Image: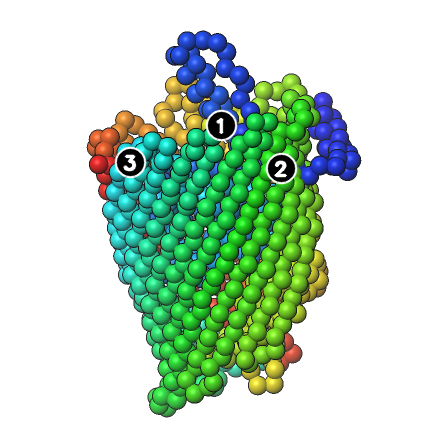
């Protein structure tokens, strides 16, 4: 062990020196070049190529750290939403969520935009919901724990890149139809996949239809205490919530191979989703004054659609270099209708508020990448990534003037990256990315505001395969990342709550927000001892400047929440993962595949006194355990996920608490024939929900509000047919 540690220290020191002295900026190259095939007959050549393909593993062999989840793993449990797929991946948690769906996807336990979600390498437009993206339209999911120059470095916690289907299967005709059912919950789905090859052209088309209908009760309790700790207010509320959510995804793709070997690809994605919901809330006061509206009724209608298309040209040069150019366009529409009725303590209707809003998003993007092998051991790439997006929005509230708003976001990034194989055991990735964003917001109810920010992100990653071993290796990365405020956080427009209080405040944006900047360190150890067998341990740290939190204040008339920059924050974490077939330990064992992961996260905000001054309700501890078993035509398995919540101190006056969550799932796949198979899954077998609490405390007293969210058991069955 001491010799191995000595080599590791030398590797890290040498890597740091190379980062300082190198003039190149680098990237993670894809698969290493294959060795020339040895002369042999056709059969032997086929065996040689197949072996080379199976030997390449992007997680193990790429210098830039990356976890790749393929399509078979994605659809294993018959999920109807990609959010349900992500929660099983190591190091990823999903916060919130209920029968209506939703939930925020987090890496390192961090939400609020710290985790970057990309669709085909680009950010999805406003209004797009991950909950409406069907797993069947996804080819693979890439999880990048450390930033890469090729993608935006708005990835303080990491990046999840969802790649839509690209693989073309000749003569593919596949239909899947299924339904999920639980208490107060029903979810029918259908998916059609077609693909074929016609000479130099190939095509694929995927269509997915999704519908969810739910009904649930969400009780909550509110208590108030004076400075002496005496109970001065107690209220219990019962929310009866029902609604339905429908979505359709269409994903056509065309590929052409030209005579000179160039390829042209057209890929489009259409997403349309509709949500309609009603919420009846009754509040009963047992101590203290009643709220302004003890009984309220809410109606929400959301309509979102967007169309995205990309045209990609790849030209290979004789020197082994490659030019990859892509242009794209996005058009999206968003509409929202909100009706609120409120009844005073005497039972009379004293509030009738109706708000209609609609918006249109338009955008164009352009990316380019030139890659060349350069000299021995170097793979150099340079490129750009730019775009212009606009948003026109209008909001009409009954009895008030129409509010008009428009925004424009211009962004441009240039990068260079180089992967350098210094020795057969040691490779280094050097990258640099400059990214600039200019946002302009204007409206008839607030002053025009313009913000400009730019970030220079040097990136360094290294992979060192330990001598004296066949499959032990270490990684180290130093990155600079950032998080720019979203448009909604910059608009100084007020969104009012019904029963305004310190725990139910209005929301208003802050045009003076600055980007958060982070310095990151990542280190990991990986041990591979057989096909599909892995043990890994990793540690990370992020130091975040211009940390943004949501503060609550009283403006003399109402309570208001708004985002503010508040100094520095630090987050740290460790992660352990194991996955292996049982046969790798016991040769005579049954065909069991085991997987497990454990994550522990810590964080602190300098401007907030402890204890529990964690970042954005960060998940402190999470763990997953899974097993898969195959016996003839039957494949089955299960997954258990656990994550803690606990207390969080948001500011000197605000705090929150969330209970732990446990989720158990099982699935089974029975293949009747090569053309037909049935997939059955049961999720949330324990029937667990969770409870969340918000607290506001100052010199005048304390107010607590807790809400309980139920979690139904859901049975899903899907018939999969090829024709």
Viewer-proximal residue among 308 and 707: 308
Mark toward the viewer: 3 or 1:
3
- Residue at 40 percent across and 76 percent down: it is 356
Residue 450 can be seen in this image: yes
In the rendered image, residue 179, in percent from the top left (x then y), is placed at 26, 50
The reply to whether the C-beta atoms of the residues labelled 1 and 2 are less than 8 Å apart is no
- Residue at 63 percent across and 62 percent down: it is 438
Viewer-proximal residue among 421 and 475: 421
In the rendered image, residue 635, in percent from the top left (x then y), is placed at 31, 33
Residue at the limit of the structure toward the front, as seen here = 259
Q: Earlier in the sequence, mark 1 or mark 2?
A: 2
In the rendered image, residue 429, in percent from the top left (x then y), is placed at 65, 35
Viewer-proximal residue among 721 and 622: 721
Secondary structure type for disc 2: strand
Residue behind mark 1: 533
Residue 540 can be seen in this image: no
Secondary structure type for disc 3: strand
Residue behind mark 3: 172
In the rendered image, residue 705, in percent from the top left (x then y), is placed at 49, 71
Estimate the spatial distance between the alpha carbons at disc 1 and disc 2, rounded to whole Å. Answer: 32 Å
Residue 232 higher or lower than 376, as above or below: below
Viewer-proximal residue among 620 and 516: 516
> Which colouring convention does the figure follow?
rainbow
Q: Is residue 72 left or right of residue 527?
A: left
Residue behind mark 2: 381
- Mark 2 is surrounded, within 10 Å at the Cα level, by few (under 14), some (14 to 19) or many (20 or more) other residues, namely many
Estimate the spatial distance between the alpha carbons at disc 3 and disc 1, rounded to whole Å. Answer: 32 Å
């Amino acid at each position: 062990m001491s010799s191995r540690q000595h080599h590791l220290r030398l590797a890290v020191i040498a890597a740091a020196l190379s980062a300082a002295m190198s003039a190149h900026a680098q990237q993670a190259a894809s698969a290493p070049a294959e060795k020339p095939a040895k002369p042999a007959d056709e059969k032997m050549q086929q065996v040689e190529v197949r072996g080379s393909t199976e030997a390449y593993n992007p997680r193990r062999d790429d210098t830039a750290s990356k976890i790749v989840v393929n399509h078979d793993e994605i659809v294993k449990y018959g999920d109807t939403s990609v959010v349900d797929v992500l929660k099983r991946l190591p190091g990823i948690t999903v916060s919130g969520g209920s029968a209506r769906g939703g939930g925020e996807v987090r890496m390192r336990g961090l939400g609020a935009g710290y985790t970057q979600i990309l669709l085909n390498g680009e950010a999805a437009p406003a209004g797009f919901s991950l909950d409406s993206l069907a797993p069947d339209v996804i080819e693979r999911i890439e999880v990048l724990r450390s930033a890469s120059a090729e993608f935006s470095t708005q990835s303080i916690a990491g990046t999840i890149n969802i790649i839509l289907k690209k693989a073309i299967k000749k003569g593919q005709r596949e239909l899947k139809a299924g339904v999920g059912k639980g208490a107060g919950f029903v979810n029918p789905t259908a998916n059609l996949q077609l693909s074929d090859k016609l000479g130099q052209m190939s095509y694929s088309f995927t269509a997915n239809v999704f519908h969810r209908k739910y009904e649930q009760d969400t009780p909550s309790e509110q208590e108030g205490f004076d400075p002496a700790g005496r109970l001065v207010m107690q209220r219990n509320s019962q929310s009866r919530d029902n609604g339905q959510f429908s979505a359709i995804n269409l994903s056509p793709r065309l590929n052409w191979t030209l005579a000179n070997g160039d390829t042209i690809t057209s890929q489009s994605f259409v997403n349309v989703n509709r949500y309609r919901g009603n919420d009846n809330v009754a509040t009963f006061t047992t101590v203290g004054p009643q709220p302004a509206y003890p009984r309220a009724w809410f109606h929400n209608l959301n309509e979102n659609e967007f169309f995205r298309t990309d045209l990609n040209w790849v030209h290979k040069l004789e020197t082994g270099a490659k030019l990859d150019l892509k242009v794209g366009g996005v058009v999206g529409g968003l509409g929202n209708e909100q009706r609120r009725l409120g009844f005073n303590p005497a039972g009379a209707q004293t509030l009738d508020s109706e708000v209609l809003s609609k918006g249109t998003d338009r955008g164009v993007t352009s990316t380019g990448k030139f890659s060349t092998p350069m000299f021995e051991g170097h793979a150099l790439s340079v490129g750009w990534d730019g775009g212009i997006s606009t948003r026109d929005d209008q909001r009409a509230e009954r009895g008030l003037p129409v509010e008009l708003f428009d925004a424009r976001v211009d962004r441009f990034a240039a990068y260079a990256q180089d992967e350098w194989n210094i020795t057969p055991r040691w490779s280094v990735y050097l990258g640099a990315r400059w990214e600039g964003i200019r946002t302009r917001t204007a409206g008839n109810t607030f002053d025009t505001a313009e913000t400009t920010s730019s970030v220079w992100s040097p990136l360094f990653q290294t992979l060192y395969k330990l001598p004296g071993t066949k499959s032990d290796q270490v990684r180290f990365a130093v990155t600079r990342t950032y998080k720019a405020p979203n448009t909604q956080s910059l608009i100084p427009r007020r969104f009012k709550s019904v029963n305004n209080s310190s725990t139910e405040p209005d929301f208003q944006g802050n045009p003076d927000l600055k980007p958060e900047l982070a310095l990151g360190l990542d280190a990991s150890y990986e041990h591979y001892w057989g096909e599909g067998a892995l043990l890994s341990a990793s540690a990370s740290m992020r130091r975040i400047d211009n940390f943004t939190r949501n503060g609550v204040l009283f403006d003399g008339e109402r309570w208001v929440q708004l985002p503010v920059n508040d100094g520095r924050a630090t987050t740290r974490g460790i992660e352990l993962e194991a996955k292996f077939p049982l046969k790798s330990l016991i040769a005579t064992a049954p065909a069991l595949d085991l997987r497990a992961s454990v994550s522990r996260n810590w964080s602190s905000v300098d401007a907030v006194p402890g204890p529990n001054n964690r970042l954005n309700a960060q998940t402190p501890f999470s763990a997953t355990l899974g097993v898969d078993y195959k016996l003839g035509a039957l494949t089955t398995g299960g997954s258990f996920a656990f994550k803690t919540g606990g207390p969080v101190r948001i500011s000197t006056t605000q705090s929150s608490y969330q209970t732990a969550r446990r989720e158990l799932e099982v699935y089974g796949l029975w293949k009747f024939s090569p053309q037909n198979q049935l997939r059955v899954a049961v999720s949330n077998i324990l029937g667990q929900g969770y409870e969340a609490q918000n607290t506001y405390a100052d010199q005048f007293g304390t107010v607590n509000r807790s809400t309980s969210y139920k979690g139904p058991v859901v049975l899903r069955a899907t018939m999969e047919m090829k024709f």
